[in-house]
Image (spheres, rainbow, N blue to C red):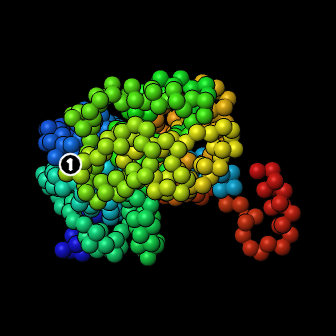
Amino acid sequence: MIPELLQSQKNFFKTGDTINVTYRKLVLQQLKMELIKRESDIIEALAKDFKKPAFETVLTETTVVLSDLDLMIKNINKWAKPKRVRPSLLNFPSSDRLYSEPYGQTLIIAPWNYPYQLAITPMVAAIAAGNTVVLKPSELTQNTSALLNNIIKTVFKPEHVSVIEGGVDVSTILLAQRWDYIFFTGSVNVGKIVAKAAAEYLTPTTLELGGKNPCIIDETANIKLTAKRIVWGKFLNAGQTCIAPDYILIHHSKKEDFYKAMKTEIEKAYTSEPKASSDFCRIVNKKNFNRLAKMLDNENCIIGGQTDAETNYISPTLIDEPSLDSEVLKDEIFGPILPVLAYKNKQDIETIISKYEKPLSLYVFSTNTAKARKIIETFSFGGGCINDTVIHFANHRLPFGGVGNSGIGAYHGKLSFDTFSHKKAVVKKGNWLDLPLRYAPYTGKLKKVKKLLKWL
């Protein structure tokens, strides 16, 4: 029924209802009320899917979505209004405007690691910008996906917004259709498949991917505070976060102190038995558990290393000095495993980071401001922090997105609205003056044009 649904959405878009800003605001307000009402259901669904703590659900999922909704509802009139742009003297007399025009039919493919937030936030932006939406949630988080479907059916007409559940076969069918915009969050490998499908119709895309995010700790860092912030950023969501630190590069003189501090902070956060902690997530499914457990084979787990296949549990783990060719240092980890590599000089850092594609995030811990800034300026990455992890995601004024292999495009805040809007440029030319210089025949005009252009 997918082609029929797309046709109904195309017909609905032609009615112009989604262009109406009052209508957009109304449905977003209705969505907000429904999400507030269903918060306990959302918390329960995520707990069922991978034992996500209620605190983490509120912090990283429901609050983020409601904040986005508030921002869109508050600013949609201003953002949707045509913007006056300073005209060029070449076009004198004229007035110029920039129109934010919805693309039309949008497809949003959401991931499993933050299955509520990373489904709803781009959807909200697409609706605010005036598009129709087909949302494909992850099949790995079935409880959350079913709940999303129920919520969307309650709030929206299917010809405006619909959820289509299913696995790879459904994604394949969806990607074979013609869309006006595709927004995908997930792995690099699947991102390439999405990009290839989009190229068939020259469909614009946003690809939010990932990578091996380095976390550099120099000899001046406050090790106790550094460990505390890394434990939070890395083991939040059991490490299943695309912007989590993926490996540590620490000055050799600080490594032993770092291990002691990490052990202390892990126990503070999750007790000496993290498996029994209600604050520590599980790996989303058996396939991902097996992939992560394999990374621990024949490695020196200086902290952690415990697993339980029955419950998909992997403890917060630090691996000391793995080989650069090891499984844990090949691809993005996406789990509670943190390899630690010591460095002696700047060249060591550059050698290891340059081994990988451009990461989605990079983190530096240092009290030497000049040195930290130099590292930030030297390497290309999507976004990051100095003396913390992950928190750059929280500022809606900062774009969130990758570069190179870690992603194409960015969103958050107003940029989310802009991502789902085509910026249409329009010049209105006055009729009271029409200079003959630009018109043919051009004989004798070249010098005058050159002089005029130079002056302008």
Q: Which residue is mark 1?
A: 311
Residue 187 visible in the picture:
yes
x 36%, y 53%: residue: 292
The quarter of the picture where the N terminus appears is bottom left
In the visual, does 329 lie left or right of 115? right
Q: Quadrant of residue 15?
A: bottom left
Q: Nearer the viewer, residue 288 or 75?
A: 288
x 43%, y 30%: residue: 262
Name above or below for residue 158 compared with residue 351: below
Q: Position of residue 352 (x, y in %)?
A: 61, 49
Q: Position of residue 77 (x, y in %)?
A: 36, 42
Name above or below for residue 396 compared with residue 16: above
Q: Quadrant of residue 4?
A: bottom left
x 79%, y 72%: residue: 442
Q: In the rendered structure, which amino acid carries the disc numbered 1?
A: Thr
Q: Position of residue 195 (x, y in %)?
A: 45, 68
Residue 400 visible in the picture:
no
Name above or below for residue 272 compared with residue 419: above
